[in-house]
Image: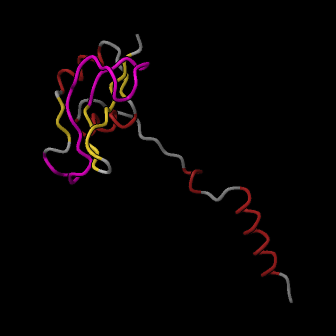
Amino acid sequence: MPLKIRLSRGGAKKRPFYRVVVADSRMPRDGRFIERLGTFDPLKAKDAEGRVVLDQDKAKAWIAKGAQPTDRVARLLDGLGVLTREQHSNPKKALPKKKAQERAAAADKAAASPA
């Protein structure tokens, strides 16, 4: 059974509130879960004390049992010092795509040619 530590959404429309849960990866996002580990309130300030409330011992125990945290949960666990995640960097993502590069090259060519 592939276990995930992931967020389960609650709250009202445009007012999200998440529970950090351990669930079978085949279950729906807000569906059946095995255990609740804590909560995450993204509307609070990043340095607010109640933004992430998590039972760190339970999280470590589930990770030791083989549960894989999702990217967002891994980021939260890294912020609490429970887990160290590798930093992702994709410097090519910000570069213009092929069509935009062609337009820029055409504009440079038009500006460089004497009129």
Q: Quadrant of residue 23?
A: top left
- Give the quadrant of the N terminus: top left
Percent x, y for residue 89? 49, 45
What span is colored magenta in the figure? 20-49
Q: Quadrant of residue 57?
A: top left
The total number of labels drawn is: 0
Q: Which residue lies furthest to the bottom in this view?
A: 115
- Give the quadrant of the C terminus: bottom right
Residue 34 lies, with reference to residue 89, above or below; the image says above
Percent x, y for residue 30? 34, 29
Q: Residue furthest left?
A: 49
The overriding secondary structure of the stretch rendered in magenta is loop
Q: Residue furthest top?
A: 1
Foreground of the two, 43 or 59: 43
Colour mode of the rendering: secondary structure
Residue 21 lies, with reference to residue 90, above or below; the image says above
Residue 25 placement, left or right of 33: right
Residue 113 placement, left or right of 108: right
Q: In which quarter of the image is residue 22?
A: top left
Residue 90 lies, with reference to residue 107, above or below; the image says above
Q: Which residue is drawn at 76% across and 75% down?
A: 108
Residue 71 placement, left or right of 18: right
Q: Residue furthest front?
A: 13
Magenta highlight on residue 43: yes
Q: Which residue is drawn at 19% across and 20% down?
A: 58
Magenta highlight on residue 19: no
Foreground of the two, 89 or 32: 32
Q: Which residue is drawn at 72% across and 69% down?
A: 104
Percent x, y for residue 109? 81, 75
